[in-house]
Image (cartoon, helix red, strand yellow):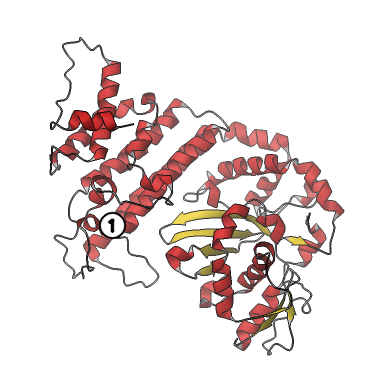
Amino acid sequence: MPTTRSQRARGRGRGHGRGRGGPPGSTGNTALAGPIQGHSGLVYELQGMSPPSVSQATSGIAADFVVDRVRRHESHRGAYFAFQMDRPESVRIFDPAERGQHVECTCDGFQSNQVICIHIYWLFDGLNAVLRNGVAPGTQVISTRDVLTQISALYGLIGSRLSSLPTLLSATSDEVSSDTDDATEAIGSPALSDARAEQVRDMLSVFDKATLPEDYDPGSSSSPASSGRQNLHVQNNLAATIYQLAIRDERVFESLRTVITHDICANTHFSKLRTRAREAFARLDSYIENGPSDDAGTDDQDIPRCAKMLRIIVDQICQFRDSRASSGPLSAPVKRKVAEVLVEILQEVCDRNEDVYYRIAWKREMADGESDRNRNLYAYLIDDPQRLNASAPSWMKETFIIDRLRQTPADEWRHLIERLTSIVDQMRERMEDEDDPPLAYTKLERMIQEYTAEAFEPSSSSVQRRPTIGSQRQSQRRRLE
């Protein structure tokens, strides 16, 4: 079992890095004189690189960094795995099926010139050693293109190793630290530590206006090598210091939990996701009104991109509700807020049941074979949803929002019954064929009618059942699960 290095070694590794291939901090722009032996023990020969790239590769492959956590994220730019270092830098490996061979780093060096940085080279060496079990011994000849190609080729293997990758990537084969045992005793079991860290990030992220708990980084979320309080101080970073204390000191954690309750965390989280949904609609409206952005780094928010982002947001809302409910009961008002956010998004989609490009003032080239659903957000998500293959996630194939509401207890959405009824009426008014209504409409109408039948006396003269549409309606209802 590999062991993480000591606090002493970690401090030594905060420069350009140390390694077996050269002296620490070596950044000379001279050509490579010989093979580089990486932190993993693998040996590389650089080929076809410019002197600056040789310098970056030499320093990066031989460096000694630490990965705190690895998480998968969904964004409007595509899915990616984020490797968060024990410092502000984070390396992102995007899904090659969506973005091709795209790897980036948040460090200033990469952001300024978009050239592979030392952090990407270091991660390339580590992933080679950890995930490519069949890598041949001896010297590997690599170029900058090889680095991107090999990292992207490992994307499919990362998901199955998320929990173990931080330890494996940060491990050394020649250092055994007694401080590691002390830290483990202070923190407790890994599962307990992870659960505690998740709750602390929930609480501290409340004070960040936009960042979600899973993306929140207090500044230094690494594990100090000693349980002593004097070693938990993170210089110039109050949030990181509180984070370290709350994970390891039960009294500090309980004090925070008393003030920042589960309800406060959840309420704040849902508010952030509601804001993200409104921003997605605003970006779509801006694109429709103004056309493509002049900024080459901005992805235009057309119908497919907006639809994907909304599905991601809906899934994040429901996943957070389900996962956080297990760590502490959510109050009825917070659960009702979840339904309010979902219904608000559903209403916004229904309000956009039209060809959004019909009256645009800018010239748009229609793609060959473009379907009507790519011009109508309602059709894309609800009326004519995309048929996906069997390997697609379940949340991409479900009836947008309506399936989630049907799985939710009526107590959480019954205060929205009038609004839901109005949405059903709106869907019926825009229906092209009343004898063959979309499944989403049928599901939502049935959900409302079932609630009405249970909430009121069937014999009451004041209750009138909504008339059904079409001779095929009853048979279609019977086919519903």
Q: Amino acid at mark 1?
A: Ile
Foreground residue, 135 or 200?
Answer: 135
Q: Residue furthest top?
A: 459
- What residue do we see at 43% from left, 31% from top? 335
- What residue do we see at 64% from left, 67% from top? 123
Residue 429's spot in the image, x, y percent?
13, 39
Place residue 291 in its image quadrant: bottom left
Foreground residue, 339 or 254?
Answer: 339
**Relative to 129, does residue 251 appear above or below in the rendering?**
above
Q: Residue furthest right?
A: 178
Judged left or right of residue 187, residue 290 is: left
The residue to which callout 1 is attached is: 303
Judged left or right of residue 59, residue 416 is: left
**Relative to 188, does residue 238 appear above or below in the rendering?**
below
Report how many numbered discs are placed on residues in the image. Answer: 1
Q: Quadrant of the C terminus?
A: top left
Q: Does dot 1 land on a helix, a strand or a loop?
A: helix
Residue 99's spot in the image, x, y percent?
44, 67
Residue 73's spot in the image, x, y percent?
50, 54
Place residue 156 in its image quadrant: bottom right
Mark yes or no: residue 60 visible: yes
Mark yes or no: residue 106 visible: no
Q: Quadrant of the N terminus?
A: bottom right
**Relative to 107, does residue 207 appear above or below in the rendering?**
above
**Relative to 175, does residue 466 appear above or below in the rendering?**
above
Place residue 286 in its image quadrant: bottom left
Judged left or right of residue 1, residue 240 is: left
Foreground residue, 122 or 337?
Answer: 122
- What residue do we see at 79% from left, 42% from top? 186
